[in-house]
Structure formats: C-alpha cells, structure tokens
Image (cartoon, coloured by chain):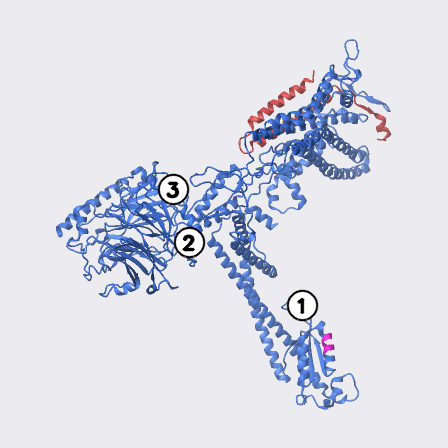
Chain colours: A blue, B red
C-alpha cells in the first residue's frame, strides 16, 4: 500500500513538475500560481489530501461518504485495488491516471492542436458571446399540443447535414459526449472522446438554428481544436446553465473539470482525494450552476458544491451497478432521475435523500421502473413533465405526469414504449435518447436518438411517434450515437432590436410582404396593442400634468441615437407606467372623494351658519306670528292654519318639521315654485345666499349656491319636500334644532374642514410629486414607446418563415449602405446576445426600385425643386445635378443686377452662416421655406451679381471699369448726339455708353437680350436632348439613340441650332465694313426673324438684300429637308423597331413570362448568400403596336411643336431681364435721382425720404417680387423646357424606415 | 480681329473646365463639385461671349439727346 502510494506520488510529482515547467516556459504568471510546489504528503494517512489543498483543509473534512464509512460496502474499493476498474486503471494503463492540477491551453497535451492553433482557438472563444442569467427567465408553461404541430414537423424534416465535409474529426477517438455552446454568433460543437480529449469544432457557416450531427464528413479544413484535459474517457459534457463561459466535463479519471473560456484553462472543478476512485459517469448541475451532481460507475450519486472546497462532496450508494445517467428535473431541481445498469430508472427526491443520509437505510426512490436489461440513459423533458429512458432491451420508454401535479410521482405512468434497436455493441457509444431544449420543443417536446442503421431518429415526446428519420447515407457513414441540440430560439427576439437598429439608421425602406393580411391579423398586433395602451397611459399623464400645470421635461438631446430596447426593458417600462397610472388614478379618485366630502362639509357649515339666523329669526318672530294672526296674507303657511297658534316651542309637538339644505342658486326659483305648487303653499321657506362660490367636484365649475330651510307640517309633507329637493339636485343636511347642538356641530364641522384641507393639500402634493416625477421621464418614455411601436409596425411587414422559424424582411436600400446595414445587424445581434445573427442577402428583382438621391444640405434644395416636378425613375439621369447651376444662372439672366444680387447674397449668407442655430429653432412656414432654399438663394445671388456685372447694372446705374468702345462728342443743348466708335470693345459686359444712350439703349439691349435668350435657350434644350442618350443607354434601348434621339436633335438643330449659328454669325460680321473704294462690302444687316420665317415660307430662295452669307439658300433648303425627314423618322422608326423586335422574340418561341405572384425571395439553403432571382408580380405589358403608334404620334407632334414653343418660351429670359432693368431704372429716376441736384436742406431731407422710398421699393418690389417672378420663370424653364426633353420623372420616392422621420412627423 | 477673344476665351474656359474635372476633390460629392464647376464656367463664358460678340460689330451707335434732360420731360 505504502509502496504503491509512493510510486503514485512520484508519478504525480513528475506530472506537477512537468506542468509547471511548461507554464513557466510560457510565462503565464498568474495561472502558474495555481500550482504550488508540491510538498511531501503525509504518507500514512488514508485520507490524504492533495498538498495544495493542505492549508485550506486543516479543519475536519466534511466529506461524509457512506461508502467510506463502510455503510454500504461497494464492490469496488479503491484501497484494495481489487475492482476490475481500479486495476485496469493502475495496471493496464498506469499513465492514464488523472492529470493533476489546473491546465492552461498552452500547457496541455494536444494531439491535434499545436501552439499556433491555440491562438486561433482563443480567437474563436473571444467570438462567442456569453450570457449569465441566474435563475433564467420564468415563462409560464405553454400549452403542449398533443398533436405534433405541422410547422414543427416541416421544420424537422428540413433538417439536414449542414456542410460539405465528409468527416469532421473533432476528437482523436470515439466520441462519448457532446454539447453545443449556446453562443449565437458561432455554432461551437464540443465533443469528448474515449481518451479524455475534448474537441471544439467551430461549425462555421451554419446559419440554421439546429444542427445536430457530429459524425459527418468532408474535404475542406474544418475548424477543430482538441485538447486533452482528462486522462480517461470523458463521460459527460455540460455547459454551465448560469454561465456560458464554463464548460463542465466529467471523466472516468476521477475528475470533473471546468473549462473556463475567459481564463482559457481547464480548472479542476471537483476532484476527490487521491485515494478515492470516483469514475464519473454523468454529471448535472443545478440551475444556478453551483452544485455539481454526479453519478459513478460504482452506483453512487453525489453532489459537490463548487463554492466549497475542492474535495468536499456527499455521496449516496443507491445502486449496486454503474449509474449511467443522472439528471435534475429542469423545473424543480429537487428531483433527479437516474438510470442504472441494474435495469432500473429511478426518480429521487434530493431532500429525502439528505434526510436519509445520516441513517443507515439506502435512500428510497420515489419512482422506479425497470427495463428488461440495463438502462443506459434517462432524461427529463425540458418541461420536467416526462422522462425518456433508453435501455439495452431495445426500448425507449416514456414516463409522464398523468395529472396536473407534475411532481406527484406516485401517479406517474408509463407512457409510450418505443421499440428501438439499442444494441450498439462494443464499438459504438451507447445510444441515449436526448431531449431538445429549444423553444420549439416547448410546444411539442421531442427527443432524438441514434439508429444503428445510420439514421438519426426524432421521436415525439408526447405520443412517442417517430417524427422524422434523418438520413444522409452519403454523409453519415457511421452510426450517429451521440446527439445534441443547439438550444436556440426562434429569431423574434433578435428581429426586434435589429429593426430598431435599422430604424436609427434610416436607410432601408421595407416592403410589405403580407399585403393581403389585414391589420388585425398581423403577427405583432398584440405588441402594438400593448404599446397603444402605453401611449394612452402616457397621454393620460400628459393631461394630468396639464391640469397641474407641470411641464414635461423635454427629452435629452439626440433621442434618436438611444439604443434599441429589449423586451425586458419594455416590460419594466410598462410596469412602471402601469404603477404610475394606478397611483395617479387612485390619487385622483381619492382627491375627488375628498373634494366631495369637503364640499359637503362646506355646505353643511353654511347651512349651520345660515340656519342659525333663521332659527333665531323664528324665535324672534314667535310673537309676531301670534300677533299677525288675522291680518297678513303674506305668510300663508302659518297664518291660515288652525294650529298656527301653537308657538314655535311647541312646534315639535305640533309636528312641524323642517328640511335644510343647499341648492344651486339658479335652480332656487324653480324649486320654490315646485314646492309651492306641490304643497299648495303649506310651507315656510327661508333662503340665504352663500357668498362664496362652491366648486363642483364633478365638473370643476364654480357654482353659486343658496342655503334654504323649509318648515312644514306633517311627516308626509316633509318627505315630499325631501323627494322634491332630491330631484332638484339639492343637497340636504340634517340640522339639530337646539342651538347648543348646532353650535357643537358647527365647531365639529369646522374642525373637520380643517382636517380635510390638510388631507387634500397632502394628496395634492403627493399627486404633484408623482406627476413631476413622471414629467421627468415622460418625454423619453414617449419616444421609446413610439419607436417600439414603429418597430413592431415594421415587423408586421415581415414574413414569418415557418420552416426556418425566422422573420424575413425585404426592403430597398442603397447599395452603398449595405455595409452600414450589415454593421447594424451585427450590432443588434451582439447587443441581444441572441442565438443567431441576421443575414442580409441581396436579391435581384424585376420590381421597380424606389429612387434615392443622396443629398447634402447644399444639394437638398435643388433636388427638392426637381422632386416636386417628379421623382426620377430608378437610376434615371437626375436633372437635379445640372439644376444646381443652370437654375441660378437662368434666374440671374432675368435678375441681373449687381446691387440686388449683393443684397440677396447678404441675406443668403446670413442664413447659411447661422444655419446651425436656425436648424434648431422652429421657424415659421415661410421662413423655413426660404431657409430650406438658402443655398439656392446664395447661388442665385452670386450669379445675379455676375450677370448684373455683364449687364453693367448696379441699382440701374452703370460701372465704368474698362475702356469704353464709344466716344461721346461734346454735348450740345437740344441736340441729339451720337457716340462714335473708337474700335474698342468693352472687355467684360455691356458698354457703359449704352447706359448713357437714353435714346436708343432699349433698341440695343432689346436685340442683345433677345438673342441671348435664344442662344441660351437652344443650348439648354440641346443639352437636355443629349441627356436622353444616357437614359436610353442605361435602360438598354441603345437603338432608341438613333431611332429617337438622332431625329430629335437633328430637327432641333436644323432649325434653332441654325438660328443660333446665324445669330453668332451676324454678330461676328462687321456689316458696315467698307472696301478700299469706300463701298459697302455687305448688304445691310438682314433681319434674322425674317430669315427664319422665309426659310419656311419660301424655301430655296433668299432675297439678295436679305442675304446673310453666300449659299444660304442651298443650306437652308438642306436643313429644311433634314427637318422634314426627321418627322417621319421620329414617328415611324421607333414603333416599327419595337414591333420587329417583338416579332423576332416570338419567332424564337419565347413566351411572355408570367410568374404570377410566386415570391421566391429568399434563396435555397445551400446557396450561401448569392442572390436568387425573384420574379414577382412581373407586370410586363403585352406589346400593342397600335397603342405604341398612337403614343409615338403624340410624342412626335408634341416634340416638333414644343421645339418652337419652347424656344419662344426662353424669350421670357429676355422679357424679364428687360423688365427688371427698366423697373429698376424707373425706381431710381423717380426717387433718388430727383433730389441729386436739389441744393440746401430741402434737398437733403428729400434725399433721405427718397432713399427710404427707393430702398423699400428695391427690396420689396425689385428683390422680393421680381425675384419671386424670376424664380418661378426659371422653375418653369427647368420643369417644362429642360425636364420635358428627357426626364420621365415617374419613379417612387425612397422612404426609409427611420425613427427620426417618425418622431418628427408625430411631434409636428 | 478682336473677335478672336471669344475663341481665346473659349479655350481658357475649356482649360479651366478640364482643370476642374480633374481637380475636383475625391469623395462622395465629386460629381456634384465637378458638374457645378464646369457648368458655372460654361454659363459664365456664354454670358460673357454673347455680350462681347453683340458689341463686336455694332450696327447702331448709342445716342442721347441733351434736351431731354434739360426739358425734364423724361
């Protein structure tokens, strides 16, 4: 014995030394601390402790193993080494003792993985996301459908081996146990083998929620890492349910280790003392993950609390043979099930076990059932209401709770008994029926088991029917003995934050995938309803706050960037809001009651006070009444009565009663009249007004009230009065008739009013405090709720794929934004820690995409100009780009004035420079319109300055910068003088001499501006026609370039292009040039207008006196011919071309593709991300020649006529520019100019007044009104003349789902 | 003679256009900047050239009458 120990000791020391050396080599300081230098153990002790634990365990060990106490002598005692197991351990494989100490990844022996791989493995681990939920979410038990849901069935049938590898060798030896890491990002399969290796396989590329086989095969390099932390077979692998960074592994080598993914080391979780053999067969932990339950080969079960010291455990000998399986009930951890080689499957109550542990009796199971042969496995279903056990007798047995009480095991019954070949033999790991833990299984539990015929069978956990037999004879070439399910959930938990994340981005426009589904039948109606309720509650708060005059604190800056909320947070919020609401409602109610009470008391007080007067009066009048017996008829009540003689003192005796109360003053008259009539005057009534108005709590209105007292005779009459008072809405108060009691009552009432006042103000204060509290948050809450609602509304547009239990969204987004979206998807996935990532796939579709022009603050205004005409067809040439310059330029042609432009520039600059402040402010409608176009105005102003400079206009005055081309002769009174050309040309702009030429400057500028308008217009239109080419090329109609574009441009240029050329030619010729003899070389300058008219009226002939250049007639004839040919070209070629193509297609046998609305928008499983063609609702029109012909005829006529009218339309440039210059000049000469020459004080005052008039006129008329008119004309030129030539403008606007837009729209 | 100025102007404008085509800063707004610059240059050139050409060979001379001012009728 001693020798053996020392031998063992040597080996152990050797192990420790080696490990330490490796660790030091790796310089892993913190980790190597775990291993302390081994000190020689106390050799004689039987209960020897590991040296490193010595310090901690000087106290009495708490281990109370029944076995060691000798209570239940197990056949295998480690001391004598007689057991077959023990001997095999020590003799046959002496090296395969347990590996001592904690192991780091680097220090560990590995057959597959080397140093380099370890790094990869660490990366892989860091990619896993972990969750720690202690306790876990408690969900109410769902209805378990007795029938297998169809969706589940299809889902299971769709399972297949999910990769192309022939084999993934995860571990070097036969796999004994496997488990999936619950990480959402990576599907990490972990398997333990016969020799103590643990293999990690990154099942990369898996997007499915379930993946179940391990024994598949392949060619490509799978990502596998394997380590050997155990010396013998790994019997069980388990993820710590409370902490997914921890992987528990148990082995026959006497140890349970925890692989801590953060520390990257295999830490010993539970190791019994060296002399105790605990070959662990199976382990489980409680829900909190702090107690490990195990079963052993020796028929023991035990548990170890990880918070205690390493070697401490309790165990119970419950069976004589190996207990292959132990599992705690997932719902109630106090129960556990074991399966034993002695054929039994037992349920134990942990509590009873513990109480029994001191006694000598064996623990008694509370439920027991026997297989005919050894039971290999028994597992609880996820809901803890049934057990599936597997036995060597070729049976899978199901036991389930028959009654509502799941733990009433006496009533458990044997359910379906399934025949299943479980004879695995020597070389295959034994089969175990394993339940699925994912959410779908809550609807209908099912379990999975291997099949000797290389299938994987899935059975229903309720009926025991075989649901699906997964087979893939090619890939599953071995018997899939060990199976595990990835505990994943459907993707809804992920979809919500994902959508929210995208909402923050605002770059996707989602398509409605369920257009036929009515709003109330959509998937997330309940959530929306819930949020509606929240909204209502928030509105309730708002109204209450408004009543109390409490301002809601505005939401903090950047509310849009707040992150997506989890369902849990929304639940919390809902709870909080509900609580607040309940409290406020309660406070409102109590406030109302108190108010009512207060009112009553106030009225009572008044009644008391006023009636006191009446009673006194009555007392005083006692004599009078008696005296006035026969005379007065003003007191009919008492006078005409026989009993009147009775004194007031005896009134009780005489049965004279009275009623006191309060009634609204406006009803008093009616009340009185009714009383009078119904009692025939048998009453005495007295009233007194209450001077202070009383608040009616029901309506919150101030009501003036009156106290009344009625004396009457007889109980019946009194009752009648009471009834009438009630019906008239009077409040009656009982008053005592003795003065003392009344005084007492008054005092009491006053005191109570005082109290009530206090209570009321208290209530009010609390309510105010509560509301103030709410006011702090209500704005944020509103935003959250609105966002949530928008999110669910969007999710309602999605399609739920039953087969794959995921939501499918389709939408449009800019190609450039795809990385951004992908990023958002990733963020959402990470933030939720969900099991699956969202997948973005590009689809190819024939649907018309929406148009999205990315604009910035500069281009936005220009794009708006175009979008208000029509949204561009998808990827059509966007005229907005050219509008940026052409619009301000054409505007400036009409608005050319340096001064006006400058004033406008100042205004625009002011807006641009202050844009940050202005953005935040709430501008008025008109201001915000100008503000939106600030960059447009800026450019318009800049161009106006330039054109003003060219026109040489500055507030209608001229600048004289360059050398003028004209010399004025000396002025002579009453004579017209004509300037003489000096051969110069004014370098830039109009010669100032023309400004001075009052007589004929209009003639010149008229001609100049008209020609300029034509030239600019023709160039503008030509440019527009040329843009057609891009459209034709883009839409794949290259033939339209010569069938449509070419005749159009030829037609245009042969007439108006020619006109422009003539204009330029005419300018470039010196018509007054003389030859050497002093004769005119040219004829007198011809009129271009006449030329154009006669070109058509008399083609082929040009009057000699009107000739512009030689050969003019021929060229003009040619041009006319071209123009004429262009008309039928335009008219006929395109339709016939289309017809020809159509016929060609038909001849080739192609038919119109009609896919109907079968929407195949997500691709096949094996298609990894490459798009598939959707052919949805393809609305390709049937080709109709006659229709096309009509269309083309209209188009042709339109174009030809438009060429003429549009050219004429550009003359507005001329007209407006002239008008502007003239108006400006008139304003100047009528105001300021009049006072320039006036001397003296009168002149000065006049000038100031004139200046005021002038500046107002300039800004009001010339800049605002003229500017507006020029703006509108420029707009028209762009919309009609420019866009009409090439722009379809029939696209759909891209409206991305954006929280920002939603919130702004709702707040507006 | 001085009509060539228009041609020179066109050449200069063409050069500037080429310059702005290649000189436009890269980035998402490159097209916008490029188009805007070129169109600005072209528009301004056109405006100037038209005005210049219109005055190159004047058909009429500017006239003014003094009496108009003296008589104060206009």
What secondary structure is found at the residue carrying circle 2?
loop
Label drawn at residue A162:
3
Give the mark nearer the N terminus: 1 vs 2.
2
Query: Looking at the picture, does residue A752 appear above or below residue A46?
Result: below
Same chain letter for marks 3 and 1: yes
Examine the rendering and report whether any part of residue A833 can be seen. no
Give the mark nearer the N terminus: 2 vs 3.
2
Query: Looking at the picture, does residue A504 appear above or below residue B3?
Result: below
Q: Real-space Cα distance between discs 1 and 2?
A: 68 Å
x and y, in percent, of residue A1289 in the image:
63, 36
Q: Chain of mark 1?
A: A
Mark 3 is surrounded, within 10 Å at the Cα level, by few (under 14), some (14 to 19) or many (20 or more) other residues, namely: some
Label drawn at residue A702:
1
Mark 1 is surrounded, within 10 Å at the Cα level, by few (under 14), some (14 to 19) or many (20 or more) other residues, namely: few
x and y, in percent, of residue A690 in the image:
68, 74
Give the mark nearer the N terminus: 3 vs 1.
3
Q: Which residue is mark 2?
A: A148
Q: Is residue A809 left or right of residue A1066?
A: left
Same chain letter for marks 1 and 2: yes
Q: Real-space Cα distance between discs 3 and 1?
A: 78 Å
Label drawn at residue A581:
none
Task: Give the magenta range.
Answer: A669-674
């Amino acid at each position: 014995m001693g020798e053996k120990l020392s031998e063992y000791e040597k080996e152990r020391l050797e192990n420790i030394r080696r490990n330490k050396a490796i660790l030091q080599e790796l310089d892993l300081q913190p980790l190597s601390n775990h291993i302390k230098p081994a000190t020689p153990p106390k050799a004689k002790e039987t209960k020897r402790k590991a040296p490193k634990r010595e310090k901690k365990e000087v106290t009495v060990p708490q281990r109370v193993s029944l076995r060691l106490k000798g209570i239940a002598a197990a056949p295998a005692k480690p001391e004598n080494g007689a057991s077959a197991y023990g001997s095999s351990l020590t003799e046959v494989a002496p090296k395969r003792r347990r590996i001592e100490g904690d192991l780091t990844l680097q220090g560990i022996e590995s057959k597959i993985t080397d140093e380099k791989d370890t790094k990869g493995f660490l990366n892989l681990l860091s990619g896993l996301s972990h969750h720690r939920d202690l306790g876990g979410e408690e969900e109410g038990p769902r209805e378990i459908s007795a029938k297998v849901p169809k969706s589940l069935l299809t889902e299971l049938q769709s399972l297949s081996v999910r990769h192309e590898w022939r084999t993934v060798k995860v571990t070097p030896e036969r796999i004994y146990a496997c488990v999936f890491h619950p990480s959402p990002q990576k599907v990490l399969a972990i398997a333990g083998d016969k020799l103590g290796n643990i293999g990690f396989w990154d099942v990369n590329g898996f997007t499915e929620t379930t993946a179940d086989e391990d024994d598949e095969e392949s060619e490509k390099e799978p990502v596998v890492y394997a380590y050997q932390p155990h010396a013998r077979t790994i019997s069980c692998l388990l993820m710590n349910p409370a902490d997914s960074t921890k992987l528990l592994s148990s082995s026959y080598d006497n140890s349970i280790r925890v692989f801590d993914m953060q520390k990257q080391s295999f830490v010993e979780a539970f190791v019994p003392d060296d002399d105790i053999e605990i070959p662990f067969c199976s382990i489980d932990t409680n829900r909190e993950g702090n107690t490990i339950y195990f079963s052993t080969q020796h028929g023991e079960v035990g548990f170890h609390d990880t918070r205690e010291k390493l070697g401490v455990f309790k165990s119970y000998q419950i069976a004589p043979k190996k207990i292959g399986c132990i599992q705690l009930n997932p719902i109630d951890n106090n129960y556990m099930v074991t399966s034993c080689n002695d054929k039994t499957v037992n349920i134990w109550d942990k509590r009873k076990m513990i109480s029994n542990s001191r006694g000598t009796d064996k623990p008694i199971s509370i439920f027991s059932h026997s297989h005919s042969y050894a039971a290999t496995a028994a597992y609880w279903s996820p809901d803890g209401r049934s057990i599936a056990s597997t036995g060597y007798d070729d049976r899978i047995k199901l036991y389930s709770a028959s009654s509502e009480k799941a733990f009433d095991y006496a009533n458990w019954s044997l359910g379906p008994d399934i025949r299943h070949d479980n004879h695995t033999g020597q070389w295959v790991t034994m089969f175990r029926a394993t339940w699925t833990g994912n959410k779908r299984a809550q609807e209908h539990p099912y379990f999975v088991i291997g099949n000797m015929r290389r299938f994987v069978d899935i059975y229903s956990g309720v009926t025991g029917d075989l649901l699906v037999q997964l087979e893939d004879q090619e890939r599953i070439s071995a018997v899939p003995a060990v199976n595990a399910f990835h505990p994943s959930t459907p993707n809804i938990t992920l979809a919500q934050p994902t959508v929210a994340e995208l909402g923050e981005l605002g770059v996707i426009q989602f398509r409605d995938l369920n257009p036929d589904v009515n709003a109330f039948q959509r998937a997330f109606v309940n959530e929306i309803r819930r949020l509606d309720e929240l909204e209502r509650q928030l509105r309730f708060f708002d109204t209450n706050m408004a009543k109390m005059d409490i301002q809601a604190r505005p939401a903090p800056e950047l509310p849009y960037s707040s992150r997506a909320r989890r369902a849990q947070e929304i639940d919390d919020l809902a709870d909080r809001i509900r609580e607040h609401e309940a409290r406020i409602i309660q406070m409102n109610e109590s406030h109302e009651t108190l108010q009512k009470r207060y009112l009553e008391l106030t009225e009572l007080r008044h009644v008391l006070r006023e009636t006191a007067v009446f009673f006194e009066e009555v007392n005083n009048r006692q004599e009078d009444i008696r005296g006035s017996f026969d005379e007065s008829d003003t007191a009919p009540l008492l006078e005409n009565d026989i009993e009147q003689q009775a004194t007031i003192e005896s009134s009780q005796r005489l049965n004279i009663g009275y009623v006191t109360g309060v009634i609204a003053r406006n009803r008093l008259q009616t009340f009185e009249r009714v009383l009078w009539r119904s009692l025939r005057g048998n009453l005495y009534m007295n009233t007194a007004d209450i001077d202070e108005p009383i608040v009616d709590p029901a309506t919150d209105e101030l009501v003036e009230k009156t106290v009344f007292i009625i004396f009457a005779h007889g109980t019946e009459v009194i009752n009648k009065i009471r009834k009438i008072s009630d019906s008239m809405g009077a409040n009656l108060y009982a008053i005592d008739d003795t003065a003392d009691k009344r005084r007492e009552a008054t005092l009491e009432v006053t005191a109570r009013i005082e109290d009530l006042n206090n209570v009321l103000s208290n209530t009010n204060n609390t309510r105010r405090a509560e509301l103030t509290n709410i006011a702090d948050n209500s704005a944020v809450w509103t935003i959250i709720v609105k966002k949530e609602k928008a999110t669910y509304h969007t999710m309602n547009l999605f399609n739920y794929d039953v087969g794959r239990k995921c939501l499918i969204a389709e939408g449009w987004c800019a190609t450039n934004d795809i990385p951004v979206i992908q990023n958002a998807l990733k963020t959402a996935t990470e933030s939720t820690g969900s099991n699956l990532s969202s997948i973005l796939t590009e689809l190819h579709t024939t649907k018309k995409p929406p148009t999205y022009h990315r604009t910035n603050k500069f281009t936005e205004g220009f794009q708006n100009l175009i979008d208000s005409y029509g949204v561009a067809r998808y990827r059509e040439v966007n005229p907005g780009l050219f509008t940026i310059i052409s619009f301000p330029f054409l505007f400036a042609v009409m608005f050319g004035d340096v001064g006006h432009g400058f004033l406008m520039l100042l205004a625009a600059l002011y807006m641009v420079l202050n844009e940050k402040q202005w953005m935040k402010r709430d501008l008025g409608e008109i201001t915000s319109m100008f503000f939106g176009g600030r960059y447009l105005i800026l450019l318009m102003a800049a161009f106006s300055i330039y054109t003003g400079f060219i026109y040489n206009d500055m507030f209608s005055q001229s600048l004289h910068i360059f050398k003028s081309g004209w010399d004025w002769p000396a002025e002579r009174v009453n004579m017209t003088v004509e300037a003489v050309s000096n051969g110069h040309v004014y370098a830039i702009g109009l010669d100032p001499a023309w400004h001075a030429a009052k007589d004929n400057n209009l003639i010149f500028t008229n001609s100049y501006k008209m020609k300029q308008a034509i030239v600019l217009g023709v160039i503008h239109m030509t440019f527009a026609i040329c843009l057609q080419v891009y459209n034709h090329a883009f839409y794949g109609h290259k033939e339209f370039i010569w069938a449509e574009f070419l005749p159009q441009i030829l037609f245009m240029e042969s007439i108006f292009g020619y006109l422009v050329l003539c204009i330029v030619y005419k300018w470039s010729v010196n018509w007054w040039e003389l030859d050497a003899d002093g004769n005119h070389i040219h004829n007198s300058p011809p009129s271009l207008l006449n030329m154009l008219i006669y070109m058509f009226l008399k083609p082929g002939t040009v009057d000699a006196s009107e000739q512009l250049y030689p050969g003019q007639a021929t060229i003009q004839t040619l041009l006319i011919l071209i123009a004429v040919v262009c008309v039928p070209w335009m008219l006929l070629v395109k339709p016939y071309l289309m017809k020809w193509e159509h016929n060609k297609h038909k001849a080739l046998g192609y038919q119109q593709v009609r896919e109907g609305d079968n929407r195949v928008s997500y691709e096949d499983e094996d298609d990894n991300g490459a798009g598939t063609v959707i052919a949805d609702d393809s609305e390709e029109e049937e080709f109709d020649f006659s229709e096309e012909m009509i269309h083309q005829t209209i188009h042709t006529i339109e174009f030809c006529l438009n060429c003429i009218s549009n050219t004429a339309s550009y003359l507005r440039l001329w007209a407006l520019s002239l008008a502007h210059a003239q108006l400006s000049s008139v304003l100047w000469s009528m105001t300021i100019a009049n006072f320039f020459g006036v001397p003296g004080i009168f002149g000065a005052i006049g000038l100031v007044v004139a200046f005021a008039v002038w500046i107002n006129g300039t800004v009001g008329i010339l800049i605002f009104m003229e500017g507006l008119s020029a703006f509108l004309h420029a707009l028209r030129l762009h919309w009609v003349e420019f866009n009409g030539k090439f722009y379809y403008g029939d696209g759909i606007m891209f409206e991305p789902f954006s929280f920002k837009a939603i919130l702004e729209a709702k707040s507006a | 003679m001085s009509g060539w100025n228009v041609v020179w102007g066109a050449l200069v404008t063409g050069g500037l256009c080429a310059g702005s085509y290649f000189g436009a800063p890269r980035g998402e707004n490159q097209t916008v900047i490029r188009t805007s610059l070129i169109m600005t240059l072209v528009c301004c050139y056109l405006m100037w050239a038209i005005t210049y050409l219109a005055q190159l060979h004047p058909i009429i001379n500017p006239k003014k009458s003094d009496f108009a001012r003296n008589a104060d009728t206009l």
